[in-house]
């Protein structure tokens, strides 16, 4: 006969989706999943280091995927999502200068809104053991020390780093 759904074990009921499954069930990006960190542009790939590449569950170039579909053309879109050890990290590789702080913070606001409203399954996998959002400097740190922009970035927990190392 048919198994009784009420008798399913709690493990079967709460099985967490993989990053690939979450991406493929998100209509706006369903065709854009990449193995490893292949979604990250070659020129930026060295900005993200995986200490154990076997723990990488894939990557997604959010910005390019949406551009290719003509979506959100006027918005400041976030760059990447990378799954590492079952947690998703969101990475923006961008110039770290005083004049770019508002742009990157707009991108962060856009990303959080997009995750909640358009990509809840990806959002459910975001990192919880450490911050899920990273601004990686594309060419050094050029935000004026002690400026209101630097204080704002620190307050938002998004101070630019030279390289993201996932352990």
Image (cartoon, helix red, strand yellow):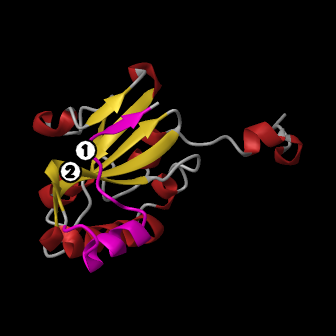
Query: Quarter of the image containing the N terminus?
Result: top right
User: Who is closer to the viewer here, 86 or 148?
Assistant: 148
Label 2 sits on residue: 137
Query: Which type of secondary structure does the marked residue at label 1 adopt?
Result: loop
The mark that comes first in sequence, 2 or 1, is 2
What range of the chain is rendered magenta? 144-166
Where residue 66 sits: x, y (%)?
A: 21, 59
User: Who is closer to the viewer here, 81 or 144?
Assistant: 144
- Say above or below: 3 vs 90: above
In 3D space, how far apart are the residues under numbered discs 2 and 1 (Cα atoms)? Answer: 5 Å
Label 1 sits on residue: 162
* Residue at x-position 26% and y-position 60%: 78
- Say above or below: 116 vs 51: below
User: Who is closer to the viewer here, 103 or 140?
Assistant: 140
Drawn side of residue 33 relative to residue 113, left or right: left
Check if mark 2's residue and mark 1's residue have beta carbons within 8 Å.
yes
Can residue 76 be seen?
Answer: no
* Residue at x-position 49% and y-position 57%: 123
């Amino acid at each position: 006969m048919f198994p009784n759904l009420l008798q399913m074990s709690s493990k079967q009921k709460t099985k967490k989706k993989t990053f690939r499954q979450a991406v493929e069930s998100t209509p706006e990006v369903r065709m854009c999943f990449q193995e490893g960190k292949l979604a990250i542009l070659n020129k930026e790939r060295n900005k993200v280091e995986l200490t154990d590449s076997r723990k990488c569950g894939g990557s997604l170039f959010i910005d390019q995927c949406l551009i290719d579909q003509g979506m959100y053309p006027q918005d400041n879109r976030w760059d990447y999502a990378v799954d590492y050890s079952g947690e998703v990290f969101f990475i923006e590789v961008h110039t770290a200068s005083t004049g770019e702080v508002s742009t990157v913070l707009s991108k962060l606001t856009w990303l959080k809104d997009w995750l909640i409203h358009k990509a809840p399954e990806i959002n459910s996998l975001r990192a919880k053991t450490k911050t899920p959002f990273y601004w990686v400097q594309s060419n050094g740190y050029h935000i004026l020390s002690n400026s209101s922009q630097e204080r704002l970035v620190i307050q938002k927990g998004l101070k630019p780093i030279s390289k993201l190392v996932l352990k």
